[in-house]
Image (spheres, rainbow, N blue to C red):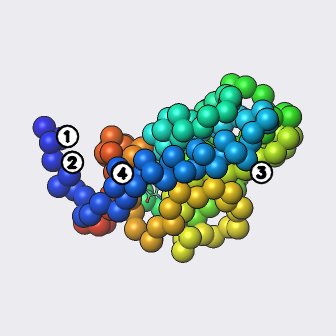
Amino acid sequence: MRSAVLDDDIARVLISEEDLRRRTRELGLQISRDYQGKDLHLICVLKGGVTFLVDLMREICIPHSIDFMATSSYGDATETSGVVRILKDLDIPIAGRNVLIVDDIIDSGLTIAYLRRILLERQPASLRICTLLNKKERRVVDVPLDYIGFDIPNEFVVGYGMDFRELYRNLRFVGVLKPELYRS
Ligand code: IMP
Ligand code: MG
């Protein structure tokens, strides 16, 4: 069975389940303080950001709402094409809301920069970005990140929501995929 060998495809654990839980708790606390008394609206970028959103929102102890957006992904490749398409738009209008985008990983920054631009046009009261992972070295466009879980090296990671060819999202940790798997 495919799932039985998932761990064999992982070169090493980069961020353990415990470290993910600890950092998510810290971020939730910080966000709760920063948005105290404000109308907080979380926007999760599907699908990779889902696991992080679900854990993060349960660490946020102030009232807030959530919504989802989906953009085109890399398909089968591990690098962005630079072309971003909206596959699913928001259900709830964001004008006048304090919006926090929740994403899994910022790599080139192209996807989030585009998303930020189109969401700003809808005139939210504020717009900030929270990402679990940040691959700084790979950035090609400058984009302000307000909350960062972990800065990570330039390696392709999977788990905790993140995939390669739609697999590995269920791993409880963030792991580095064996390079031979995606270079072949
Ligand atoms: P960017 O536009 O290059 O910043 O890529 C953004 C999206 O690509 C992320 O939100 C992820 O969904 C995906 N991505 C980038 N790097 C990785 C990775 O190492 N593993 C899994 N997905 C990734
Ligand atoms: Mg993403």
Cα separation between marks 1 and 2: 5 Å
Q: Quadrant for residue 147, please give it.
A: bottom right
Q: Give coordinates of residue 162: x percent, y percent.
A: 42, 48
| Labels 4, 2: front one | 4
Nearest to N terminus: mark 1 or mark 3: 1
Cα separation between marks 1 and 3: 39 Å
Q: Which residue is mark 4?
A: 18
Are the two marked residues, 1 and 2, in contact with CB atoms closer than 8 angstroms?
yes
Q: Which residue is mark 2?
A: 6
Q: Is residue 64 visible?
A: yes
Q: Which residue is located at x 56 percent, y 70 percent?
A: 136
In the image, residue 57 sits, relative to residue 5, either above or below, namely above
Farthest-out residue, top = 91
Cα separation between marks 1 and 4: 22 Å
Are the two marked residues, 1 and 4, in contact with CB atoms closer than 8 angstroms?
no
Type of the residue with mark 3: Arg
* Element marked by disc 1: helix
* Element marked by disc 3: helix
Q: Quadrant for residue 169, please give it.
A: top left
Q: Which residue is mark 1?
A: 3
In the picture provided, is 166 more to the left or to the right than 108? left
In the picture provided, is 3 more to the left or to the right than 132? left
In-front residue for pair 96/90: 96
Q: Which residue is mark 3?
A: 117
